[in-house]
């Protein structure tokens, strides 16, 4: 009873202490252990004053292809200019239209009010299926 449960609790504490000692020994040897920091989520994004990604020591990450906010803004404005130029021509829009499609697609039927199911409809369907099931079993 009580003595057995106390003994089990003592054994569990002893085992936990042994595990903690082993892990402490591994940490002292320099081995990395999976910890709660890895479970907390993605690593924080660190940026320098120019908006480039840096590591913990301040070194640039991906120097060959640095993306800054200015680069992104410049590319976006170039894309917007191209879009405006194509819009003025009008021929670019027609290239995306499929002649097989109707000009005004039929929208689904609009309902002015809610359409409720007739009272007892699903009960009748269930009863009918039960009857069919009992007759097919026979």
Image (spheres, rainbow, N blue to C red):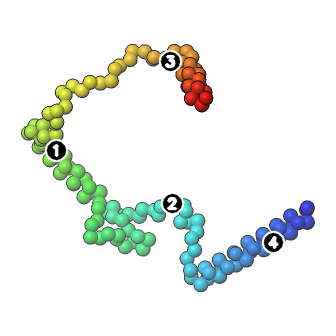
Q: Is residue 91 above or below residue 104?
A: below
Residue 11 disc label: 4
Question: Residue drawn at (42%, 62%), measured in percent from left and top?
Answer: 45
Q: Which of the 4 quarters of the picture holds residue 6? A: bottom right
Which numbered disc, 4 or 1, marks the residue closer to the eye?
4
Q: Which mark is residue 41?
A: 2
59, above or below 137, in the image: below
Tell me if label 4 and label 3 are in contact, CB under 8 Å.
no
- Of badges 4 and 2, the one in the foreground is 4
Nearer the camera: disc 2 or disc 3: 3
Q: Quadrant of the N terminus?
A: bottom right
Check if mark 1's residue and mark 2's residue have beta carbons within 8 Å.
no
| Local secondary structure at mark 3 | loop
Vertical arrangement, residue 90 with respect to residue 22, above or below: above
The residue closer to the viewer here, 126 or 91, is 126
Disc 1 or disc 3, which is closer to the eye? 3
Q: Which residue is mark 3?
A: 117
Residue 88 coordinates in the image, percent (x, y): 10, 38
Q: Nearer the viewer, residue 79 or 71?
A: 79
Per the model, the C-alpha gap separating discs 1 and 2 is 39 Å
**Sequence-earlier tag: 1 or 3:** 1
Q: Looking at the image, which residue is at 25% across and 53% down?
A: 73
- The tag earlier along the polypeptide, 4 or 3, is 4
Tell me the quadrant of the picture where the C terminus can be found. Answer: top right
The circle on residue 83 is 1
- Between 49 and 13, the residue placed more toward the observer is 13
Q: Secondary structure at mark 4?
A: helix
Q: Residue furthest front?
A: 138
Kindly report the distance in space between the C-alpha atoms of the residues bearing marks 4 and 3: 65 Å
Q: Residues within 10 Å of mark 2 (few under 14, many from 20)?
A: few
Q: Tell me, yes or no, whether the two marked residues, 1 and 3, touch with CB atoms within 8 Å.
A: no
């Amino acid at each position: 009873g009580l003595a057995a449960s106390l003994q089990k609790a003592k054994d569990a504490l002893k085992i936990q202490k042994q595990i903690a000692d082993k892990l402490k020994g591994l940490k002292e040897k320099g081995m990395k252990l999976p910890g709660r920091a890895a479970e907390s989520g993605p690593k924080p994004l660190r940026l320098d004053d120019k908006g480039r990604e840096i590591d913990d020591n301040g070194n640039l990450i991906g120097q060959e292809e640095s993306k800054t906010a200015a680069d992104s803004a410049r590319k976006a404005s170039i894309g917007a200019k191209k879009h405006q130029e194509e819009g003025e021509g009008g021929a670019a829009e027609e290239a995306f239209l499929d002649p097989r499609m109707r000009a005004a697609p039929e929208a689904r039927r609009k309902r002015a009010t809610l359409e409720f199911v007739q009272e007892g409809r699903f009960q009748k369907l269930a009863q009918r299926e039960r009857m069919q099931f009992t007759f097919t079993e026979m």
